[in-house]
Image (cartoon, grey):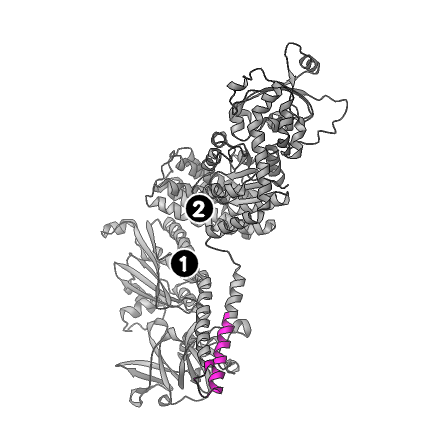
Amino acid sequence: MDMNEIKEIFFQECEEQLAELESGLLKLNDGDRDPETVNAVFRAVHSIKGGAGAFGLDDLVSFAHVFETTLDCVRSNKLEPTQDVLKVMLKSADVLADLTNAARDGGSVDEARSRTLIRELEALANGETPAAAEAPAAKPAAAAPKAAAPAPVVEKPVVNDEGFQPIPFSFGDFDDEPAGHYVPTVQVVFKPKKDLYAKGNEAVLLLRDVSRLGDMSVYCDMDSLPTLDKMNPEEAYFSWKISVTSEKGEDGVRSVFEFAEWDCDLDINTIEEDVVGEVTEDEEQPMQPVPFDLSMLDEGGSAGNDEPAVMESDAAAAVAAAETATKVAQAASRAADNKAASAAASAASAAQANQAAAAGQTIRVDLDRVDRLINLVGELVINQAMLSQSVVENDANGTSSINMGLEELQQLTREIQDSVMAIRAQPVKPVFQRMARTVREIADITGKSVRLITEGENTEVDKTVIDKLAEPLTHMIRNAVDHGLEMPEKREALGKNPEGTVRLTAKHRSGRIVIELADDGAGINREKVRQKAIDNDLIAADANLSDEEIDNLIFHAGFSTADKVSDLSGRGVGMDVVKRSIQALGGRISISSKPGQGSVFTMSLPLTLAVLDGMVVTVAGQTLVVPLTAIVETLQPEASAIHSFGASQRLISIRNSFCPLVDVGRILNFRATQANPMDGVALLVESEGGGQRALMVDAIQGQRQVVIKSLEANYTHVPGIAAATILGDGRVALILDVDAVVAASRGQSLRQDISLAATG
Amino acid sequence: MKKKVLTVDDSRTIRNMLLVTLNNAGFETIQAEDGVEGLEVLENANPDVIVTDINMPRLDGFGFIEGVRRNEKFRAIPILVLTTESDAEKKNRARQAGATGWIVKPFDPTKLIDAIERVTA
C-alpha cells in the first residue's frame, strides 16, 4: 500500500465522517443532548483534521481545527448547542465538505464563505452569541459570483497552529562535534517518582537517551533505600546526578525528559566548564557508580536473563536491582512471552483475522469489480436462456433429466443475478443527506424557515440510480422551497406553522423504488400556471384542461411560474429537465397538488439499470422489447373502436375515452405504410403529460427479464431506441424508448437513419 | 526479534499510515479500532509498545490506557498517545491515565519510530 492509496482511503473515510457529522448535528438540532452524539460529531471533525494533517491539506486542517475547537466547547458544556449555534455548525459542515472535495478533486472553495464561518465559529468558541446581524452581512459575499472576483486573496485564517508543530527530538550528529568550540555541560538531578515507572517510563532508558547526547557521567544516589524487609518493590528510591557535555545543551536534555518530567523531581542546569570538575570531584557528596550497565539495553531486554549476575555484586547493587526488578522481570517475561508468541505467531494472527472478521461486517470492493461481475452474470443469464432454448428445440420429449437440470440452472441464475444486483444496491441515505444541505442553503437565501423530514433513508436502490438521483432531487427541492413554501409571515397569517415542512420519502413498491417529495406550501397556483401556459403558447386560450393537466404543464420545457427569475430555481432549468432525467433512468414522475395544502411529487424508478422486465413484441418482422413499467394494459382493437382523425391520425376509443393510436412500425420506419390496426395488438402506455397512447405492434411474444446492453456504448445513440438486449435465441432485440416514440408520433419525427439500426 | 506494536485508532487513514510506517521500520504491527477492541486483542497481541489515539468511539484513549494499566500482566507496557492537540490539558489527562509519552499528529515516520525507540529497550 502506498500513500496514494491511503489518501484514497482518507477521502472515503472523510465522506463517512461528513455524513456522520451532518446526521449528528441534525440530531442535536432536534434536541438530542446525548453526550455520545456530541462526541461522535466531535470525532468526525477530529478524524478529518487528523488525516488532513497527515497529507498536508492545510486549508482543511485549519478549518477543521477552528470547527473542532468550537465543538469542544459544546462537548465540555461551555457552549449551549442552540438552534442558532447549530445553524453555524451545519453551514460549517457544508464548508468542510466543500474543502474536502476541493482537496480531492482540486476544485476551489468559496473563500469568503469559509472565512465568514471561521469568524463565526471563533466567536462562538469565545462565548459570543451568534450575531444575527452577521449572517445577512455574510450573504452577499457568499452569493457573489466567484468569476467576478479578482484573483482571490488567500488569507490564511488565524489559527493556533501549535497543534501541528513537530516535537523536536532528533538526536542529531553528536559524534562530530567541531573541535575547539564551546560545548555546554549540563547537570541534571533526576529523582523519579513511582508514577514514572507505573506509566511505563524507565529511568534506565532515559539515562540511555541522555548518554546518546554526548559524554555523560552519572552517579546514583541510593541513600534513601530502605532495608529489604521495608522495601516496596514498586516504590522509587533512587536518584541520579548526571553530567553530560553535549551540543544540544540544556534543551536537548530537557527533551529527553519530556515524557517524564511530571513524574520526577528534575533539576537541569547548564554549568560553567570549570564547575564540571568541582562537581565530579566533590568529596562532600558520596556518590557511587550506577550499579547496572547501560549496555544491557542494547541487547533488547535479553539482559533480564542475567539478573542474578547483577544482583550478586554487593548488597547495595542487590537492592538497586530490586528497584528495577519488577521492570526487568517484566521485560524478561515479555521477552519470553514474545518467544512463545512468535512460535504461535500463526495462531495469533489467525485469531487476529477471526477478530477482524467478526468486527467488520462490511468489505470495500472496487466498483469496477462489481460491474464486471454484473456483466458476467448478464452474460450468464443470456447463455442460460440460449441453452434452454436449444435444449427445448432439440429435445422433443421434454421430460429428460436435462430439462430438470435446466430448470434448476434457471432458478440459480436468477438467484445469482438478484444477489449480484443486491451488491450494487445502496441506501438512498447519502443523497437524502445531501438534500438537507440544499434545504438549508435555500432556506437561508429565501429567508424561509424550512424543516426537512426524511423517511425510508435505508431503502436500497442501484448505485447508478442513486448517483443520478441527486441532481433532479436537488432541483425539485429548490423548487419546493422557493416556489412551494410561503414566507413565514404569510404562513402565520394563514394559520400554518411558520416553519414549512418538506418531506422526502423513499419506499419500495412492487419492484420499483418510489420517492416522494411533499411540501406543505401553497400548492400549485393553477390560474397562474394556466395563464403562463397561454402566454407561452403552450395551450390555446380557451383550452379546457383538467386540474391534473394544468399541474402537469409545469413539466413543459421553459416553464417557470416564478414572477421573476430567482437565483435559485431560475437557472434556466425547469421541471422539464427533472422529468427528462427521471425518464432517462427509466422512471416516471407525477404531481398532485392541493391549493393551500401543498404539492406532492412522486417519482417511481427501477431498482436497477442492468436488467429490465420487458414485453417482447414483433413489429414488421423485428423483435422489440417494450419496458413493462410503461405498459398500462394490452388490448385487441376492434374495428368499431378505431376512428380516423385528420389525414393520417387514428384514435382508439377505450372505455369511452379517445386515445391516439401510434404505429410503432411506421414511426421506426420499419414499414412505409400504416398497418391495419385490426391485425395487431395495442399496448396502452403512459406518456408524458399524464395522457395515454396506444402503441400498435403486430404481436406479443411474451414477457421476459432482459439484460440491458447499452447501444451508445456499443454502437451509437438511435432515436426511439433506449437500448438493446440479447434474447434466448442469441438474437439482438432493441428496447423501445416509449416516450421518444410517443413524442415522434406527435409530429416530431425521428431521424431517418433509424432503419439502419433495425437490423435485428 | 521484531518488536511488536499494538496501534489503536478509529481512523482507517491513520491505521493504514501506522501500519505502513511501522512495517517499513521492521515492526510487527497489530491493530485495533477502538479502546474496547484494543483491550480485547491485548492478551493475544502481547505487544512491546502501544500507540493509541484519544478520540475514539466506545472507549476512548484515556479509558483504554487506564484499562491497560489495570491489567496485571500488561500494566508496565509503554503507551504512546497519538494526539493532534498539543494543549497541556489533554496531555495531562493522558498522562494521568498512565500514558508514557505522546506523538503529535501529523507524525512523520521518523518521529513515530523515534518515539517508539525512546520508550522501548
Relative to A403, is A526 on the left or the right?
A: left
Q: Position of residue A255 (x, y in %)?
A: 60, 28
Q: Are marks 1 and 2 in contact (CB under 8 Å)?
A: no
Q: Nearer the viewer, residue B108 or A583?
A: B108
- Mark nearest the camera among 1 and 2 is 1
The residue sitting at 55% across, 44% down in the picture is B30
Q: Amino acid at mark 2?
A: Ala
Residue A446 at least partly seen: yes
Write the start and end of the magenta stretch as one range.
Answer: A377-401
* Direction top: furthest residue: A284
Q: Assess whether residue A33 is covered by the magenta stretch.
A: no
Q: Label 2 is found on which chain of the structure?
A: A
Q: Is residue A32 above or below residue A689?
A: above
Residue annotated with mark 2: A93
- The crowding category of the residue bearing disc 2, from other C-alpha atoms within 10 Å (few below 14, some 14 to 19, many at least 20), is many
Q: Label 1 is found on which chain of the structure?
A: A
| Dot 2: element | helix
Q: Amino acid at mark 1?
A: Val
Q: Nearer the viewer, residue A125 or B99?
A: B99
Residue annotated with mark 1: A428
The residue sitting at 24% across, 52% down in the picture is A496
Q: Earlier in the sequence, mark 1 or mark 2?
A: 2
Q: Quadrant of residue A276?
A: top right
Q: Position of residue A246 (x, y in %)?
A: 69, 24
Q: Quadrant of residue A138?
A: top left
Residue A146 at least partly seen: no
